[in-house]
Amino acid sequence: MPSPRSRRPYLFTAIVAVIAAGVGLRLVPLGLPKAVVKYGGSVLWGAMVYGLVAFPRPKAATGRLAAVALALAVLVELFRLVHTPGLDAFRLTLAGQLLLGRVFSPWNVVAYAVGIGLAAALDRWTWKG
């Protein structure tokens, strides 16, 4: 089994690939159904959160990383219920839409959980043999 530190370059590469796929899915007109674009992007966002949580803690257990990533994703989704003029203005920008989203939806939490679960499963399969 490779050392936990050697996971970081792979995690970094995966994070960048997931971000590129998510931005491409949301911004490139691929002719996909709107639901695939919306929830596919949310699944990829969840996978990105898992990668960002795993990157600084390469020795942590996969289940713990997934739990932290899911808690963080839920908090970000709940944060959509908070409205201030400045925050709402940021949410109207492309960066705000991609990072925070605009509207609360429990279905997004389901999509995040799917992305986190898939990322955790791939991580476990890749590094735990």
Image (cartoon, helix red, strand yellow):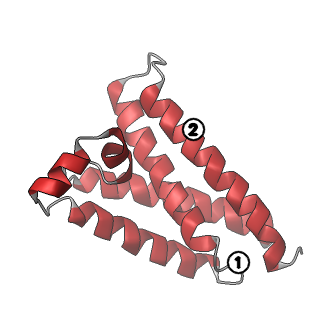
Could you tell me residue 68's position as x and y percent?
47, 77
Front residue (pair 92, 74): 92
Could you tell me residue 72's position as x and y percent?
39, 71
Could you tell me residue 34's position as x and y percent?
33, 26
- Tell me the element at label 1: loop
Q: Residue at x 22, y 41 (%)?
A: 92
Instruction: Evaluate whether residue 102 shows in this view.
Output: no
**Where is the N terminus found, in terms of image quarters?**
bottom right
Q: Residue at x 57, y 38 (%)?
A: 21
Q: Residue furthest right?
A: 1
The residue under label 1 is: 58
Tag 1 and tag 2, C-beta contact below 8 Å: no
Q: Is residue 93 left or right of 72 when viewed as pictured? A: left
Mark 2 neighbour density, 10 Å: few (under 14) some (14–19) many (20 or more): some
Mark 2 belongs to which amino acid? Ala
The residue under label 2 is: 21
Q: Residue furthest top?
A: 31
Alpha-carbon span between mark 1 and mark 2? 23 Å
Q: Is residue 53 left or right of 58 when viewed as pictured? A: left
Residue 43 numbered mark, or none: none
